[in-house]
Amino acid sequence: MQSLSDLPVWLIIVIALLALFDSVMKLIALWKAARNNHLAWFICLAIFNTIGILPIVYLVLNKQKALPKAD
């Protein structure tokens, strides 16, 4: 079994970036699911780790158009 010090530096950086990306996307999607009262989406987003794929799907499917500003 390889230790962490035996892995190439670029691989460690890629894994760290993927973990950071997944965490940010998951937090954004969980926040929006909670605000929109989408309990099933919230539970699925909280349980499944999909490297950011499921949160992106949720965010794309549940986009809300910005309301025009009243001047």
Image (cartoon, rainbow, N blue to C red):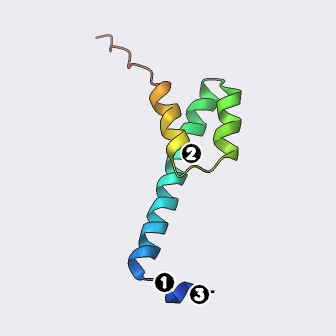
Q: Secondary structure at mark 2?
A: helix
- How far apart marks 2 and 3 lie (CA) works out to 30 Å
Relative image position of residue 5 (x, y in whole percent): 52, 89
**Mark 3 = which residue?**
3
Circle 3: residue type: Ser
Res. 7 mark: 1
Nearer mark to the viewer, of 2 and 1: 1
Residue occupying the far front of the picture = 1
**Along the line of sight, which residue is nearer the eye, 70 or 31?**
31
Circle 2: residue type: Leu
Compared with 56, 63 (above or below) is above
In the rendered image, which quarter is residue 45 located in?
Answer: top right
In the rendered image, which quarter is residue 67 located in?
Answer: top left
Relative image position of residue 8 (x, y in whole percent): 42, 83
Res. 27 mark: 2
Badge 1: residue crowd in 10 Å (few <14, some 14–19, many ≥20):
few
Residue occupying the far left of the picture = 71
